[in-house]
Image: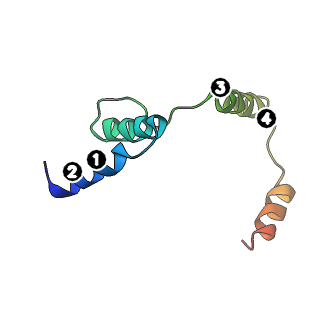
């Protein structure tokens, strides 16, 4: 094991169990041993499902609304 990897693992050991699992998921995703990098909670899944349903119904922001959002952020 390289010094850098050992240092990283020592840092991970100081994290909460939940954060350790997050790091492990990322490592496994990089190594292609796990299909997904992001794990969504039920609220996030519901939000995405609603967004997809809105898109299926053709409910998109108007060009005017998009321009207003861009202007708000200086774009």
In the rendered image, residue 34, in percent from the top left (x then y), is placed at: 35, 29
Q: Residue at x 29, y 52 (%)?
A: 8
Q: Quick one: which residue is furthest to the front in this view?
A: 14
Q: Quadrant of residue 44?
A: top right
Cα distance in 3D space between marks 4 and 3: 24 Å
Q: Quadrant of residue 69?
A: bottom right
Task: Say whether marks 2 and 3 touch (CB < 8 Å).
Answer: no
* Residue on which the image places disc 1: 9
Q: Which quadrant does the C terminus fall into?
A: bottom right
In this orientation, which residue lies closer to the viewer: 55 or 46? 46
Task: Say whether marks 1 and 2 touch (CB < 8 Å).
Answer: yes
In this orientation, which residue lies closer to the viewer: 13 or 39? 13
In the rendered image, residue 25, in percent from the top left (x then y), is placed at: 39, 35
Cα distance in 3D space between marks 1 and 4: 47 Å
Q: Residue at x 29, y 49 (%)?
A: 10
Task: Say whether marks 3 and 1 touch (CB < 8 Å).
Answer: no
Of label 3 and label 1, which has the lower sequence position? 1
* Residue on which the image places disc 2: 6
Q: Nearer the viewer, mark 4 or mark 3?
A: 3
In the rendered image, residue 23, in percent from the top left (x then y), is placed at: 39, 42
* Residue on which the image places disc 3: 42
Up-down relation of residue 26 to residue 49 (above or below): below
Q: Nearer the viewer, mark 4 or mark 2?
A: 2
Of label 4 and label 3, which has the lower sequence position? 3
Of label 1 and label 4, which has the lower sequence position? 1
Q: Quick one: which residue is furthest to the bottom in this view?
A: 74
Q: Residue at x 42, y 34 (%)?
A: 21
* Residue on which the image places disc 4: 58
Disc 2 is placed on an element classified as helix
In this orientation, which residue lies closer to the viewer: 56 or 50? 50
């Amino acid at each position: 094991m390289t010094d850098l990897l050992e240092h990283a693992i020592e840092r991970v050991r100081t994290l909460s169990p939940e954060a350790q699992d997050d790091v492990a998921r990322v490592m496994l995703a990089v190594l292609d041993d796990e299909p997904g990098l992001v794990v969504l909670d039920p609220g996030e899944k519901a939000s995405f499902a609603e967004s997809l349903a809105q898109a299926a119904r053709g409910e998109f922001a108007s060009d005017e609304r998009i321009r207003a959002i861009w202007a708000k952020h200086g774009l």
